[in-house]
Amino acid sequence: MTVRICITGAAGRMGRTLIEAIALADNGVQLRAALEQPGSSLVGADAGELAGLGRNGVLVADNLAAVIDEFDVLVDFTVPTATLANIALCAEHGKAVVIGTTGFTVEQQQQIDLAASRVPICKASNFSSGVNLCFKLLDMAARVLGDEVDVEIVEAHHRHKIDAPSGTALAMGGVVANALGRDLAEVAVYGREGQTGARDRDTIGFATIRAGDIVGDHTVVFAAEGERIEITHKASSRMSFARGAVRAAGWVVRREPGLYDMQDVLGIRG
């Protein structure tokens, strides 16, 4: 069975990388539709040429409804409002979805949960296999080290990223907080300034860097008296994320309705 994929934000950095990843994949996937926002000068362009691969015959459209019958699974790395509109249409037409968009509010996440009761959705803060392995290592480290360490998370991304901290950093914080029996919403500290006083051991700190063309760096520091452990992932190419998303697309389209993530795709949950 060939899995037919539609890419949104096809002309963006991640969109072009996803198109390339599909062309390089060997797991029976095929690009069948590509989308850009209405009014884009690239509507009507060949998606293969956008990705630097040469013509592939898939022309960039600006209306998801117009191509809804041409694909089995939508891969969306755009912005929350656009993603939610796309999910709603996919749920109406029984199409699976892979979500790489971050920055959703609690209310927006509830809309995703509702759509997942109708179609299979794979949503992840990061589709890199390496990052998802780090999630497992963080859980192990937090459970072993317990309340004897201070936890700080530092993340860096390119200057164009619009949300902070990154979805991956928040997911890492969530893994650690859960392992320590804490509520991240209550213990997270987002940056420090001025006379902050002594650090509260229960807090989990976040520091954010936005600069240049950094693809994505994440470090979680477990600092005790006399020693510290750092678990770091550094991405040098968006291709690691794109390969994971394409793998997720081939996996989720065969699943029952529900909300899945990359841990499920990789078979390392629990």
Image: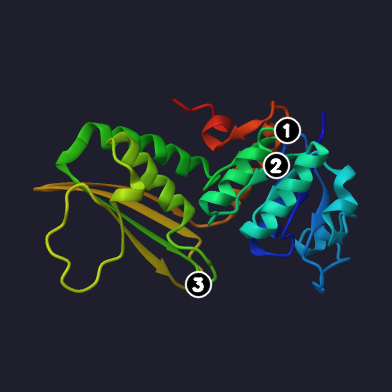
Question: Considering depth in this image, is 215 or 69 the residue closer to the camera?
Answer: 69
Report the disc number at residue 97: 2
The answer to which of 103 and 269 lies nearer the viewer is 103
Q: Nearer the viewer, residue 132 or 270?
A: 270
Q: Quadrant of residue 42?
A: bottom right
Seen from the viewer's position, the closer of residues 198 and 35 is 198
Along the horizontal axis of the image, is 65 left or right of 253?
Answer: right
Q: Name which residue lies at 56% across and 50% down.
A: 107
Specify the farthest residue to the left.
226
Distance, label 1 to label 3, CA atoms, is: 34 Å
Check contact, mark 3 vs mark 2: CB within 8 A.
no
Query: Against 254, is 166 above or below?
Result: below
Compare marks 2 and 1 and give the one earlier in the sequence.
2
Please give left or right for residue 49 compared with residue 21 in the image.
right
Q: Check disc 3 and report the residue beneath it.
A: 159
Q: Which residue is mark 1?
A: 253
